[in-house]
Image: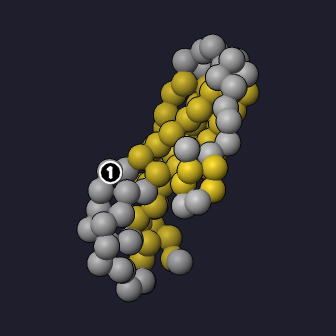
Amino acid sequence: MEVFGEPLPEIDFSKKTVIAVCLGTFTHSGYAIEIRQIVDTGLTVVVKVYFITFVDKVYLPVLTTPYHVVTISKVNKPIIFKTFEVMEDC
């Protein structure tokens, strides 16, 4: 499978865990989402996710579907998502 002409990397799911966050669809380019920190607390894995609204920007009137996907070493414990809403300049 390819994305924008680049082949997707192979993932060995016996060694990796994939974490993905998605915002849904928006009608302009003023939003983003980022996984900014992943912490193994011993009993759980905490994923800190930031929902970003850009300020002081001219937004493009396009459909966007912000997402962020990362891989980490395989975990067999609960994954907890903590979300934060922030406003940022570009």
Q: Quadrant of residue 60?
A: bottom left
The quadrant of the rendering that contains the N terminus is top right
Of residues 45 and 17, the one nearer the viewer is 17
Colouring of the image? secondary structure
Residue position marked by numbered label 1 in the rendering: 24
Q: Relative to residue 25, is residue 19 depicted above or below? A: above
Of residues 21 and 56, the one nearer the viewer is 21
- Can residue 69 be seen here? The reply is yes
Q: Quadrant of residue 78?
A: top right
Q: Relative to residue 14, is residue 56 depicted above or below? A: below
Compared across the picture, whether 80 is left or right of 16 comes to left
Q: What is the x, y in percent for residue 16?
A: 68, 26
Compared across the picture, whether 47 is left or right of 62 comes to right
Residue drawn at point x = 30 percent, y = 66 percent = 63
Residue drawn at point x = 54 percent, y = 24 percent = 79
Residue drawn at point x = 40 percent, y = 65 percent = 31
Residue drawn at point x = 63 percent, y = 56 percent = 6
Q: What is the x, y in percent for residue 56?
A: 42, 83
Of residues 82 and 1, the one nearer the viewer is 1
Compared across the picture, whether 51 is left or right of 5 comes to left
Q: Relative to residue 66, is residue 46 depicted above or below? A: above
Q: What is the x, y in percent for residue 8?
A: 62, 46
Q: Quadrant of residue 12?
A: top right
Compared across the picture, whether 67 is left or right of 73 comes to left
Q: Secondary structure at mark 1?
A: loop
